[in-house]
Image (cartoon, rainbow, N blue to C red):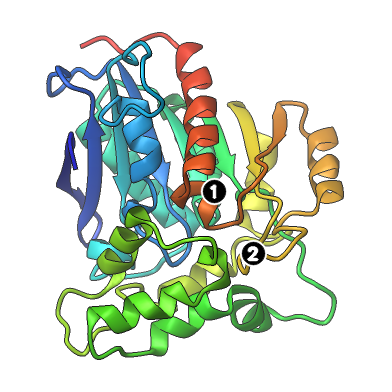
Amino acid sequence: MTGYRTHDVAVRGGSLRVGSWRSDGLADGAPERVVLAVHGITSSHLAWPLVARRLTGTTMAGGAGAQPPSTLVLAPDLRGRGRSAGLPGPWGMSRHAEDLAAVLDQLAPGSQAVVAGHSMGGFVAVMLAVRRPELVAALVLVDGGVPLVLPEGWTLQTAVKDGLGPAAQRLSMSFPDRDAYRNFWRGHPAFAEGFSAAVRDYVDYDLDPDGPPWHSSCRAEAMAADHAEQFVDGPVDRAWPQLTAAVTFLRAPRGLFDEPGGLYPPHGLEYWRARYPELTVREVEGVNHYTITLGEIGAEAISDCVAEHLDSIKPATA
């Protein structure tokens, strides 16, 4: 991947793996514009290449056009996922926010970032913006970050089992080879319209590198602990009133299983928009909860929104 590299950032308990994409000619230590991209609950930093390439100009879609300003995109594997799976708990939004602050402090010192968070990554982004507001210029919440309402009769344990479905189920499964794992994902309804190269790379990276047998690198105990903090009356809900950064929410109209209605019903977002005037809500047509980052339509919508926020802040100085 052009412009792509990885870093290991010192955090509490060990090292956090971080992927980065950098515009050509951008010198180490002095990025003009910084984006921090935070993945979802069982995901990894390879949820973000399509967005990162657009923002850095390492892949220009659609022919002629001006090269975007020099940009650095940082995307960590959150604690308990990807190549950060070995980091110890406790997990939770505050610990993840602490890790993200370390990423910015070490890889983009002195910069203020636009933070894009997908799904659970949106909740981490909100917590970072409250705990370290000087690091965050604006938030782009991608189908996440707004506290969820626990359905009537559900417990948090039910929400993990029924709400996350195959995403949670796969963490206890083993696969004989990489093709078997790819086939598992090919059968996921979110990717019924096509299994792209970006999805293939995302799926391959999700496997623990110590196989065979092969299994997801995401730790089930990390997922369960983090999922419990995404609901109304949880820590992120209590943090929202302290937000000062501009917030744009990008809604996917279809859900984790490509079902209509999505993760966030529009009426629920209207409640939050009325409660927090700094929140702007945009619909991204033609995507589901996965393809909003792993498909070209969603990647374009996210990168355009992030670029708008980047254009509104002053470049960092060395």
Is residue 284 or residue 235 the one in the foreground?
284
Where is residue 257, by image quadrant? bottom right
Residue drawn where x is 64% and y is 47% of the image: 286
Which residue shows up at 71% across the image and 31% down it? 279
Mark 2 Cα-neighbour bin, 10 Å: few <14, some 14–19, many ≥20: many
Residue 86 in percent (x, y) is at 23, 71
Give, as a three-letter code, the residue at label 1: Ile
Q: Quadrant of residue 244?
A: top right
Residue 283 vs residue 69: left or right?
Answer: right
C-alpha distance separating marks 2 and 1: 11 Å
Whole-percent x, y for residue 178 in the image: 24, 78
Nearer the observer, 90 or 177: 177
| On-image quarter of the C terminus | top left
**Above-or-below relation of 16 to 50:** below
Residue at the limit of the structure toward the front, as seen here: 63
Q: Quadrant of residue 104?
A: top left
Left or right, 79 with respect to 127, comes to left
Residue at left offset 40%, top offset 89%: 172
Q: Which residue is mark 2?
A: 258
Q: Amino acid at mark 2?
A: Asp
Q: Which residue is mark 1?
A: 292
